[in-house]
């Protein structure tokens, strides 16, 4: 992936000049966008997807000694012990009345360097973020459309796994391999299910599992992730289907470079900035996918609450799926 501007490539604003927007749909002060579709009646209905009580956690390991999968330029979390039994062995631990000892950690991280929700104001073009807020509201921290309103609201709805890798008979999709909304529908049908309006789409490519299997040079060399690819029809489909949340096991939820226009990450603007679709990235989907393949139940209750990071552009999360 190149970060050098290429004059033959249109700006993302030009590419999306006629693309639909949901700005104003939930009022001038909205900061959670399409999560507004997840209404209480829909949540009650989604709870009906719970059949066996099986629970799956979708966060990847964080601060793992083998490294964490992150967008190039970010680094994985670093956790260090600041208090452990060694302190008492060295005679340096505090002497609490009653003799209690304890362990404590300190961690530095990119909040978007693990399984994470993007704030709606995370990505923009043409000086405006979600809902038309001025891009200057991002300076020094997001004062509009940060991760906070999403964290405070929480995400609960009917989730549907779309196992594109299994559907294409692959362990993992290829570098830069694309799929469309029509593929999502065909995959759902092959699984014996159907995408419903307002479903949380949980899309598996096998990509994050590859991070733990191959050498870093192979994973990051020629870094073009597989994923959904931009088309006006796809954007219209997301809008018509009122999709609240797109969850994937890739780092950026879409093919890194649009193979047609050459634009980097156009869906971040077309879906998140323009429609208010929340993006959840770096999800661990292999255990859930194996279970869905075994019991053929691909729909479930999906729940998630990113951390409440004040003015944050995104936040780590450990989504829970209950079948
Ligand atoms: C970028 O910010 C480039 O990606 P992400 O949305 O994956 O955090």
Image: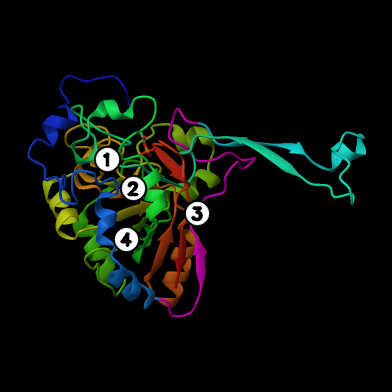
Per the model, the C-alpha gap separating discs 4 and 2 is 10 Å
Q: Which residue in the protein does label 1 denote?
A: 268
Q: Residue furthest bottom?
A: 51
Q: Residue furthest left?
A: 18
29 left or right, relative to 102: left
Residue at disc 1, CB closer than 8 Å to ligand 1: yes
Labels 2 and 1 touching (C-beta < 8 A): yes
Determine if residue 205 is in view. Answer: no
- Chain-order first, disc 4 or disc 2: 4
Asked whether 138 or 190 is in front, the reply is: 138
- Chain-order first, disc 3 or disc 1: 1
| Quadrant of ligand 1 in image | top left
**Span colored in magenta:** 50-74
Q: Secondary structure at mark 2?
A: strand
Q: From the image, which quarter does the C terminus lie in?
A: bottom left
Labels 3 and 4 touching (C-beta < 8 A): no
- The x and y percentages for residue 247 are 36, 53
Q: Residue furthest front?
A: 97
- The x and y percentages for residue 261 are 17, 33
Q: Which residue in the protein does label 4 denote?
A: 200
Which numbered dot is residue 114? Answer: none
């Amino acid at each position: 992936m190149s970060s050098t501007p290429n004059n033959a490539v249109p700006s993302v604003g030009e590419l999306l000049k006629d693309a639909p927007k949901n700005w104003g749909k939930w009022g001038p002060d909205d900061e959670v966008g399409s999560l507004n579709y997840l209404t209480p009646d829909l949540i009650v209905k989604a709870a009906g997807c719970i059949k066996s009580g099986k629970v799956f956690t979708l966060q990847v390991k964080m601060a793992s000694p083998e490294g964490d999968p992150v967008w190039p330029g970010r680094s994985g979390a670093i956790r260090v012990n600041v208090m452990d039994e060694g302190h008492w062995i060295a005679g340096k631990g505090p002497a609490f009345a009653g003799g209690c000892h304890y362990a404590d950690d300190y961690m530095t991280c990119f909040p978007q360097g693990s399984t994470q929700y993007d704030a709606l104001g995370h990505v923009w073009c043409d000086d405006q973020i979600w809902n038309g807020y001025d891009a200057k509201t991002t300076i020094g921290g997001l004062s509009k459309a940060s991760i906070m309103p999403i964290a405070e609201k929480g995400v609960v709805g009917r989730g549907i796994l779309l196992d594109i890798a299994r559907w294409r008979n692959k362990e993992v999709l290829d570098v830069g391999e694309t799929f469309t909304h029509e593929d999502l529908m065909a995959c759902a049908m092959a699984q014996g299910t159907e995408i419903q309006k307002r479903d949380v789409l949980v899309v598996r490519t096998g990509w994050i599992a590859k991070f733990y299997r191959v050498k870093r040079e192979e994973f990051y060399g020629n870094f073009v992730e597989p994923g959904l690819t931009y088309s006006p029809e796809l954007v219209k489909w997301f809008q018509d289907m009122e999709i609240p949340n797109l969850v994937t096991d890739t780092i950026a939820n879409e093919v890194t470079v649009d193979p047609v226009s050459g634009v980097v990450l156009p869906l971040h603007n077309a879906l998140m900035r323009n429609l208010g679709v929340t993006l959840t990235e770096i999800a661990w989907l292999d255990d859930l996918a194996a279970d869905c393949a075994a019991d053929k139940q691909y729909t479930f209750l999906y729940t998630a609450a990113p951390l409440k990071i004040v003015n944050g552009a995104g936040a780590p999360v450990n989504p829970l799926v209950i079948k």
